[in-house]
Amino acid sequence: MRSDTPDSLDSAPADDRTTKARIRDSAIECFAEYGVADTTARKVATAAGVSAGLVLHHFKSMEGLRIACDEHVAAVIRHYKDETLSAGPQLDLFAALRDFDSGSMIGYLARVLTDDSAVVAKLVDNMVSDAEVYMEHGVESGMLQPTDDPRSRATVVALWFLGALVMHRHMKRLLGIDLTDPDAATDPAFLNYMRPMTEIMGSGIYTEGFATQVKEALASPTNPDLEED
């Protein structure tokens, strides 16, 4: 029988995050909603239920807050990707996607990546480095094929993913799926993205013969523009 006491299992769980963590998470939501230029300490403070002075007390400046948000988002994604790619080929991909509680983090990335700054450059560099590590774990677990150039492959895959987020409005317009939506993985239109992505990442676009031809050409280019210094 349902209890109506304050200790009921139906009551909302207590928020046990520190004040600093609540401010950071509220900032991620604000950056995702308003963008970098229009997010202020006052807006973050209102969302977190604290004073603007407390925001600056914890993070010193809005740039300090941005850096903290970047580090947190990158760490969460790194942990998720590492766990996913370490699971091996038996992984239930769609269950893993559904279980990833991204909140406003993907929307945050879509917003901040358009900011041409040293802070964003560092974020991208860190995410590429993270991708190199967890993709190597994917090789070890049997999910990914090995490569002669893991750094470059990680760079291309990471920038592909991040670029898709920046272009999320066009993704929505053309494929009907908003990758910044926390519930994107449960939207039937998500298959419009996953199917071609799996085709490209899995069996590829080139025929086996043409892929071999391209690989050989790149190994010993005759085009002077492609020759290494």
Image (cartoon, grey):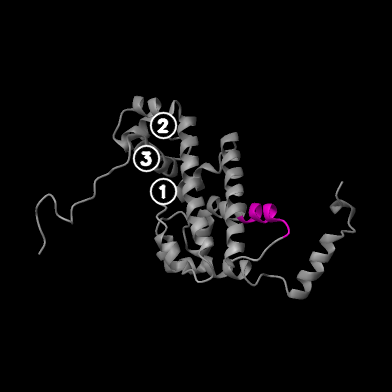
Depth check: give the residue in front, 89 or 186: 89
Q: Is residue 151 magenta?
A: yes
Stretch in magenta: 148-157
**Foreground disc of the pair 2, 3:** 3
Q: Is residue 141 above or below residue 102?
A: below
Q: Residues within 10 Å of mark 1 (few under 14, many from 20)?
A: many
| Residue at figure coordinates x 83%, y 60% from the top left | 219
Label annotation for residue 104: 1
Mark 1 and mark 2: span between their CA atoms?
A: 17 Å
Give the foreground label among 1 and 2: 1
Q: Position of residue 115 (x, y in %)?
A: 56, 39
Question: Hey, what amino acid is under mark 3?
Answer: Ser
Q: Which mark is residue 26?
A: 3
Residue name at image x 51 percent, y 54 percent: 168
Quadrant in which residue 185 is drawn? bottom left
| Location of residue 71 with respect to 61 vertically, above or below | below
Earlier residue among tags 1 and 3:
3
User: Upstream in the sequence, badge 1 or badge 2?
Assistant: 2
In what quadrant of the picture does the N terminus appear? bottom left
Would you say the residues marked 1 and 3 are in contact, meaning their CB atoms lie under 8 Å apart? no
Q: Secondary structure at mark 3?
A: helix
Disc 2 target residue? 40
Element class at badge 2: loop
The residues tagged by marks 2 and 3 sit, at their Cα atoms, a distance apart of: 12 Å
